[in-house]
Amino acid sequence: MAMKMPTEYKLVAEHVGIEYRVKRTGEYLQAVRDVSLQIKPQEFVCIVGPSGCGKSTFLNAVAGLLPFNKGHLILDGIKISGPGKDRAVVFQSPALLPWRTVVGNVKYGLELRGTDAAVMEEKSMAMIKLVGLGGNEHKYPNELSGGMQQRVNLARALASDPELLLLDEPFSALDAQTREVMQNELLRIWQETKKTAMFITHQIDEAVFLADRVIVLSKGPGSVVAADLEIKLPRPRNEATKADPEFLAKVAEIRELILNEKK
Amino acid sequence: MNTSQKAAEVTGIDLSSFPKRQWNRFYYSNERFILGASGVVFLLALWELIVRVNLVDPLFTSSPARIWTAGIQYVSSEGFVNDFIASGSELLAGFGLALVIGIPLGIVMGWYPKFNYLVDPIFNFLYASPRIALVPLFIIWFGIGMGSKVAIIFLSSIFPIVFNTLMGVKTIDPVLLNVPRSYNAKDYQIFKTVVLPSSVPAIISGVRLGLGHALIGVVVGEMTAATMGVGHMMFTAGQTFQTDLVFVGLIIIAGFGVILTSLVQLLERHFDKWRVDIHK
């Protein structure tokens, strides 16, 4: 393992390039060409970009699920070379084990790490309460709504107490109302836990509403960082934030950037 | 005016709907069983009838009453115990071996594509080959005792078990596999927590199919060079025009199959209890 160096950043990506092999043709495709970015501790960063720009691919590389062929990814001064205890992913689809109850699913990450049963129980129960699912501990996923399933997905990631929380378009499959509720819930939970978060989305207003900083990726394949914008909207944010002129200006600015990317 | 209407007039209570409603409720909660049983009873009655009115010769077709008499006689004889133990232990050994080898083999074939590529041609060849024609060879290889019968039962039942398990593992939702991977899970943990539970329905349907093939294997194995067993008894009876006894053997084997299948179904329900509303 590399020597641990003190750093002011939680995550540093240096000229990261990711290519993968297209199974059908056997050709290699450069999904991400050159992405450099930094995330500070306790920062909430959203990554947006046109569809197919490789933002989910980048998240998977940070999660250690995909190898990258260029550059470095450094978390807390240590190079990322695979999945690790310091990261947890909130997946795009809830990805819950259907034969496990809510508490069984929330425990899952801890269980794989051989956590003590009593500790596991206590942490899972606390997380279930935190995400607002108290009383549903013993239900199976198919008895829950889409929004509730995503809460379980989030609770599972939080239960393992990660240094960096990776969220891969977690609200993209939800209906508009549920999505808004979940955005507010996520902010409330983030404010309570103060986890460093990297959130991938294609929804610009969602990114501006949630983030301290929005990073725009260029059109893929072969994407690079096109813009890095700080969002100085006051916290805690709520529905009124969405009427703030600053909010609207940022959304318009990013929309313009992405539209230009698409040309 | 019928009696219940009269009663209603006298007492002022409408009695007519009560027994009817109760019967309806009983019927709808047991609809499947009642209809199934009616079908069987109807078929047996028809069979008995056409024999009784001399439409067909009972020497060829037997009849439910004759089978019943022959059945009682056979089951209370010493031969039955020996036949049953012989066939039962062959089935247990052959089918058990198919389970113990087939399920892990299917899992490994589904999980490691390279291993699958390696053994797939051999498997397809064996599956397509008429295994029944190999019985004489099995007798040479494994002797006229239990060995050749176990071999044929094993070879009859292992293919559906392997192929179904393989499909079960191959069709696992890849998204579910990313979860343990993101937590840095070891291979055996992924096997235990995702691969095995999500393949259970496919494995169980393979076991059910395999069981049917195994029961056929019992009879086929006892066709030649056997001295006892339920299958052997059926053949001897058939060759000596004891039609009643052939049907007795058939009922014993099929009945045994039904019992084992329902045991497998119990197992399936145990593993599938998280699936809401499927047991209808």
Image (cartoon, rainbow, N blue to C red):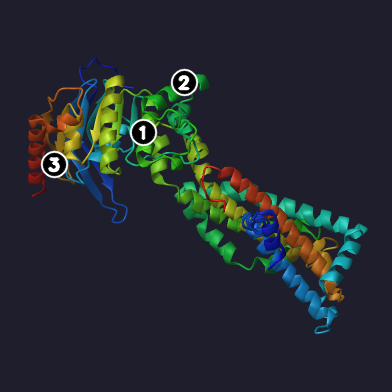
Dot 3: element: loop
First in sequence: mark 2 or mark 1? 2
| Mark 2 chain | A
Percent across and percent down for residue B226 are 82, 63
Assess disc 2: are there few (<14), some (14-19) or many (≥20) residues with their C-alpha within 10 Å of its C-alpha: few
Residue A151 badge: 1
Q: Is residue B133 left or right of residue A58?
A: right
Q: Is residue B74 left or right of residue A131?
A: right
Q: Say what amino acid the circle numbered 2 marks.
A: Glu
> Do labels 2 and 1 touch, CB within 8 Å?
no
Dot 1: element: helix
> Which quadrant is the N terminus of chain B positioned in?
bottom right
Q: CA distance from mark 3 to mark 1?
A: 31 Å
Q: CA distance from mark 3 to mark 2?
A: 43 Å
Q: Say what amino acid the circle numbered 3 marks.
A: Ser
Q: What residue does disc 3 label?
A: A218
**Quadrant in which residue A231 is drawn:** top left
Q: Mark 2 and mark 1, same subunit?
A: yes
Percent across and percent down for residue A258 are 11, 43
Residue A122 badge: 2
Q: Mark 3, mark 1: which one is toward the viewer?
A: 1
Q: CA distance from mark 2 to mark 1?
A: 18 Å
First in sequence: mark 3 or mark 2? 2
| Mark 3 chain | A
Dot 2: element: helix
Which of the two residues, A78 or A106, is positioned nearer the viewer here?
A106
**Looking at the picture, does residue B158 appear above or below residue B225?**
above
Which of the two residues, B176 or A225, is positioned nearer the viewer here?
B176
Q: Mark 3 and mark 1, same subunit?
A: yes
